[in-house]
Image (spheres, helix red, strand yellow):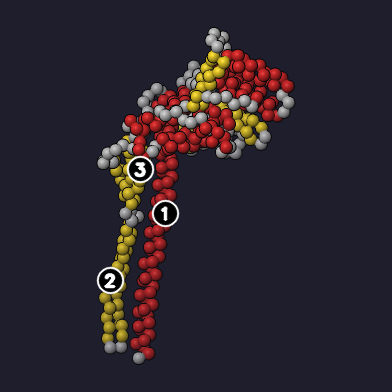
Amino acid sequence: MRFQLQCQRRSAYRAVALIITLASLAGCTRGELEHKADAYNQAIAESNNRQILLNAVRASQRAPMSFVGFGDVAASPTFSGTAGGTFNFDPLGLTTYNINPTLNVNGGFTSFTMNNLNYAAFAQELQRPLSPSIVEYFDQLKFPKELVKLIFVQEYTLAVQRRQRIASEAAVRCRTRGNQRDADICAAMERDRDRFYKAGCQDFPETHGTMTVLNVGRDLCAMVTFQTFVRQLRLLEVELPFKPRTSQAILYYLGELIAAQNYSTHRFLPEVLIEKDSRRLAVPLFEVERAAGTVAGAAVTVSYGAETFFIPTPVFGSNEEARSLQVLDLVSQVITAATSKDALPKTSTVTLVQAR
C-alpha cells in the first residue's frame, strides 16, 4: 500500500512539473510580445524620422513630396500546448509511462498597415497655418528660443521706421555689452555680418513705408538678414507679431537648409544660437550631408536619386552638439498633429506588409 502511494505521489509530482513547464513557456510568449512591441515602437519612430528627412531632401531638389501613415499592428497571438502520452498500470500502481508534451507559440505580429496620405484632407491639414501660440508653447518647454523662431516663423512685417529704430537700439546695446548675454548675442551678429559681406551680400534700401523680413534658409544673404533681425529682437527683449509657417512650409524650409549645405553657390552650414552653461553658443541647426554609398554610424539615413543623405550623430553634451534631431522632434510633433483620423483616406482597402 505504501509503495502504491509513493508511485501516485511521483505521478502527481511529474504532472505538476509539466504544468509548471507549460506555464513558464507562457511567460516566454509574454516576453516575446513585449519585445516585438518595443521593436515596433522603435521601427515607427525611425520610419517617421526617415520620412521627414526624405521629404526635406525632395524639397531641397524641388521635387514633389509624398507621405504615408503608419497604421496599427494586426496581432493574433496564440498559445497552445498538449501533454499526450501513454501510462501503464498494474494492481500496485503506475509501472511505466511515456509523456510527449508539445507547445505551439505564435507572437502574432503578422502584418501592419500603411496608408497613402496623398489625399486632399491631409494636404489641407499640412497647408493650414500654425497658431502663433506654438512658439510660446515650445518656449515653455525650454526649446532653444532661436531654433523655435527659425522653424516656425515665416516672416515679420513692420514699418520701415521701426525696423531702423530696432537696428539702431541694438547697435547701441552692442557698443556697451553690459553683460555676458549681450556680449554673446552681439558677437554672433558680428560673425554673421562678416559672412554676409564675404559672400558679396548687400542691404537694399527700402522704398515703401512697410517692409517684410523673410525667413529663407537656402541663401546665405537672406538667412543672415533674418537671423540678425531675430537676434536684435532677442537682444532688446522685444516680441513682434509674425506670420507662422504651415506644416508643409516647415518641410520646405528644411529642404532649403539642406540645399544651403549641398547645392548653394556659397555653401554654408546654418547655425542657431543656443543657451548652455549661461553662455550663448552657435551650433549647427540642421546638419545633413550626402554620400555616394552606405554610411555607417549616422543618426538618420535615406536614399534618394542614387545618393545617400544622412544626419550625422550629434556629439551629445558637447558645445558643438548639432540640433538636427531636436528639429526632427519639432517637425514630427507638427506632422503628427496634422495627421488626424479625418485626414486618413476613406477606403476599405489598406496595404498589408508582411512582417519578417
Q: Earlier in the sequence, mark 3 or mark 2?
A: 3
- Check whether the beta carbons of the residues at disc 3 and disc 2 lie within 8 A of each other: no
Circle 3 SS class = strand
Q: Earlier in the sequence, mark 2 or mark 1?
A: 1
Vertical side of 277 occupied by 18: above or below: below
Q: Amino acid at mark 1?
A: Glu
Q: Amino acid at mark 2?
A: Gly
Vertical side of 82 occupied by 139: above or below: above
The residue that appears at 54% across and 36% down in the rendered structure is 137
Q: Splitting the image into 4 quarters, where does residue 101 fall?
A: bottom left
Q: Amino acid at mark 3?
A: Gly
Q: Splitting the image into 4 quarters, where does residue 1 fall?
A: bottom left
123 relative to 322 in the view: left or right: left
- Identify which residue, 149 or 51, lies in the foreground: 149
The residue that appears at 47% across and 27% down in the rendered structure is 245
Which percent across, then down, holds residue 130?
A: 46, 30
CA distance separating discs 3 and 2: 41 Å
Residue identifier under label 1: 34
The residue that appears at 67% across and 27% down in the rendered structure is 184
The numbered disc on residue 71 is: 3
- Identify which residue, 31 or 159, lies in the foreground: 159
CA distance separating discs 2 and 1: 30 Å
Q: Earlier in the sequence, mark 1 or mark 3?
A: 1
Of circles 2 and 1, the one toward us is 1
CA distance separating discs 1 and 3: 19 Å
The numbered disc on residue 84 is: 2
Which percent across, then down, holds residue 89?
A: 27, 83
